[in-house]
Amino acid sequence: MDKRQIDLSTMVKGMKECRLTIGHDGRATLSADNGSTKVTRDLSNAEMSRLQTILGADNLTDEGKKIRIAGLVNGIVISQQVSQNYENIEQRGQQQEQSVKR
C-alpha cells in the first residue's frame, strides 16, 4: 500500500500548503506552511484521535468538519511557531550571555 496524501489547503485558510500524508504503516504526517512557519511532523496519538473523532462525527456537517479540522491544523502550526520563537529567544539570550562573559 502506497502513501496517501490529502490536500487540506482548501480547508485551512491562510495556508500556502497544507497536506496530510498517511504512510503504509498508518502514521499520519502533517506538512503545513503558513508563510512564516513550516511544519512537518507526525501527528500525536491525541491529534490523530481528535481528527478521527471529527471525521466520524455524524452530528457535524461537512462545513463543520472543515472548520474543526482547520482549528486542529492551525493549533499545531501555532504551537510549532511558539516553540520556534521560544528557542530563538533562548538562543539569543545564551549568545548575549556569552558575549558579556568575554
Image (tube, rainbow, N blue to C red):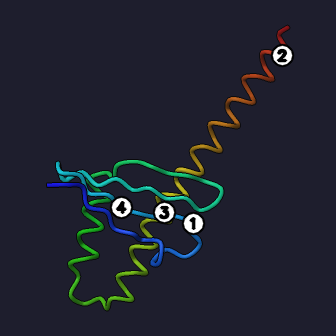
Q: Residue furthest left?
A: 1
Q: Disc 4 residue type?
A: Leu
Query: SS for tag 3?
Result: helix
Q: Name the residue at 70% across, 37% down.
A: 89
Precedes in sequence: disc 3 or disc 1: 1
Dot 1 amino acid type: Lys
Cα separation, mark 3 vs mark 1, equals 16 Å
Q: Position of residue 57 (x, y in %)?
A: 23, 82
At label 2, which amino acid type do we have?
Ser
Q: Amino acid at mark 3?
A: Gly
Q: Is residue 84 above or below residue 58?
A: above
Disc sitting over residue 37 in the figure? none
- Disc 2 target residue: 99
**Residue underneath mark 1:** 16
Q: Nearer the viewer, mark 2 or mark 1?
A: 1
Q: Quadrant of residue 90?
A: top right
Quadrant (top left/top right/bottom left/bottom right) for the C terminus: top right
- Reading the chain from its start, which is encountered first: label 3 or label 4? 4
Q: Which mark is residue 20?
A: 4
For the residue labelled by badge 4, is the local secondary structure a helix, a strand or a loop?
strand
Residue highlighted by disc 3: 75
* Left or right of 38, for residue 21: left
Question: How many angstroms separate mark 2 from mark 4 (CA)?
Answer: 43 Å
CA separation in Å, label 2 and label 3: 36 Å
Q: Residues within 10 Å of mark 1 (few under 14, many from 20)?
A: some
